[in-house]
Image (cartoon, helix red, strand yellow):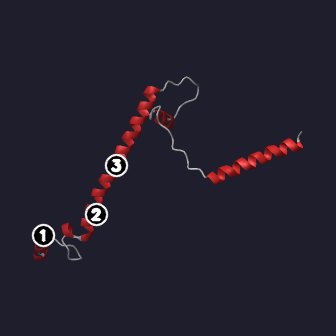
Amino acid sequence: MENSEQTEQENPTNSTGHHPATHPATTRIKKNRRFVRISNRREWKLKKEIQKEIEMGKKTVLNLSNRHSIDADYRLLGKGLKYCIKPKPHSTLQCKQDIFTFARKLRLKEYFFK
């Protein structure tokens, strides 16, 4: 009994015959752990930037209304006066069609509701 315990202590291997430190699953976990840390750092940095925008908005905005502003409002206002949302691209064909239908509705109203 003592001989088998001594050999296990001298040569620590698990049931698959691999050393615990060099087992493929162990090294995979260690590699994944590194990427988890990096992604956590990115999330932390993003949260920090969001908090900075919210604080900037709270410094620049004086709420005179009865409406309670939420953090999203302060975050948007914290971007500054030059912040502009990029407009959606529009189709010239769709624009022409909308103008045509609007003009048609006006002509029909003029004709029937004179």
Q: Is residue 36 above or below residue 51?
A: below
In percent of width and height, residue 37 lies at: 30, 53
**86 lies left or right of 11:** right
Query: Which callout, 1 or 3, points at the residue further toward the start of the chain?
Result: 1
For the residues bearing labels 2 and 3, Cβ distance under 8 angstroms = no
Question: Disc 1 to disc 3, how far (Cα)?
Answer: 42 Å
In percent of width and height, residue 38 lies at: 30, 52
Q: Nearer the viewer, residue 75 or 100?
A: 100
Q: Is residue 82 above or below residue 43?
A: above
The residue that disc 2 covers is: 29
Give the foreground label among 2 and 3. 3
Q: Is residue 50 above or below residue 57?
A: below
Residue 54 placement: quadrant: top left
Residue at position x 58%, y 25% from top?
66
Residue at position x 65%, y 54% from top?
93
Mark on residue 9? 1
Amino acid type, label 2 = Ile
Amino acid type, label 3 = Arg
